[in-house]
Amino acid sequence: MSELYLKGIKETDPEVYGTLERELNRQQNQIELIASENIASLSTLNAQGSVMTNKYAEGYPGKRYYGGCEFVDQAEEIALQRVRELFNCKYANLQPHSGAQANQAVFLALLKPNDTFLGMSLASGGHLTHGAKPNISGKWFNAVQYGVKKDGNDKDLIDYDEVESLAVEHRPKIIIAGASAYPRIIDWKKFKIIADKVGAYFMVDMAHYSGLIAGKEYPNPIEFADVVTSTTHKTLRGARSAMILTNNEDIYKKINSAVFPGLQGGPLMHVMAAKAVSFGEALKPEFQEYIKKVILNAKILSETLVNRGFRIVTGGTDSHLVWLDLTPKNLTGDKAEKILEEVGIACNKNAIPYDPNPPKITSGLRFGTSAATSRGFNENDFKLVGEMISDMLDSLLLNDQESIKVAKETKNKVLDMCKNYPIYNRAF
Ligand code: DSN
């Protein structure tokens, strides 16, 4: 694949070519468990690295501020028609460059500076852009944060009573549901009822779940939400970009003005073409089969880790996410992430609810099964992956000689598994 995809760069810019080749080798030889990543199809990569890179197209199809837009208009129209079908919605804006910008566009459309909104806290598995203090969402607005239950039968699950009482107390203009580590089904209807009670807009950021929703294995929020944002490259396995969906014409008009000219200039039309391609892929029945496997593999991974004595935050998963609590093993997330990376297992440290450790250390790890499932990993493979993760984490309690032996054996197993599933030599 590298010869085909990187053709030309090798001769014209060997220095950058080297970085691309090394990254391809890393992806080939590591087991990718970062929950927000995936392996886009070669067609998506090719569309993104295409001649549409060269085109400016400020405005929307048929209403551009530049000439020569006939064909980029066609690409955007195809992408729009496909995404509306995929998520069963009336209106879509596909121009936000990223999920963070999609969320900013909603704020620009529906809020004024210092307005109050309600979002899930980062510490409970929410997202940075839902009101965390270091982010613009937490600096320019009065962001009130809800979380998950600390104990009881529904420990780690979204505290809907808290959402309701905070909403009643603070009267937010927007209530946001959506998360980046929460592995369970979110009750969109409950959020909508609370939003209606206080006259708030209900916004869903489905970035992590959009592929699962397109694959019909996770509830579609469009039925309840006033506005839905998402990235397009996580479980949805598309181009690296974002989108905003709604069924409300008035909100749609406000969102369009907020994205352009409010927040962005020219849309990235090569990315638009790549989004059209990946939405086409997600509409195929094979994508639904893929998503079923993603969730099954996450359940297997979660069960394997539980059988090896680990605690999974929320006790399991309904999605691609597995959220590991390392406190019963007396380990920290940063150390665990490092030793797994050394043997070729890529994941990220992640705070757990009510984490005693600071965000740069954490007491948890977040895993996702979308990328490895894309390259063909099955249930047996994910059982082995769970065993390898457990072997490595348990090896921290062994003496140096024994732990070096475990690391060496695990690294070889990782390489063997990766060899069985080469990337970019098969059609998805
Ligand atoms: N950074 C992404 C994630 O890892 O979930 C979200 O933006």
Image (cartoon, grey):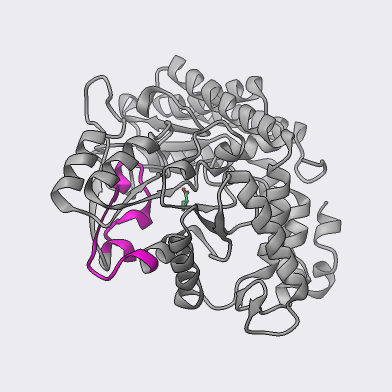
Region rendered in magenta: 109-138
Q: Which residue is drawn at 75% across and 43% down?
A: 423
Q: Quadrant of the C terminus?
A: top right
Position of residue 180 measured from the top left corner of the image (x, y, whole percent): 43, 44
Q: Could one spot residue 344 in this view of the protein?
A: no
Q: Is residue 205 left or right of residue 355?
A: right
| 111 magenta-colored | yes
The relative height of residue 53 versus residue 101 in the rendered view (above or below) is below
Q: In this view, does 37 lie to the left or right of 25?
A: left
Position of residue 353 measured from the top left corner of the image (x, y, whole percent): 29, 37
The relative height of residue 315 versus residue 368 in the rendered view (above or below) is above
The relative height of residue 318 versus residue 153 in the rendered view (above or below) is below
Q: Could one spot residue 80 in this view of the protein?
A: yes
Position of residue 262 measured from the top left corner of the image (x, y, whole percent): 45, 76
Q: In which quarter of the image is residue 411?
A: top right
Residue at the far left in the pictured view: 169
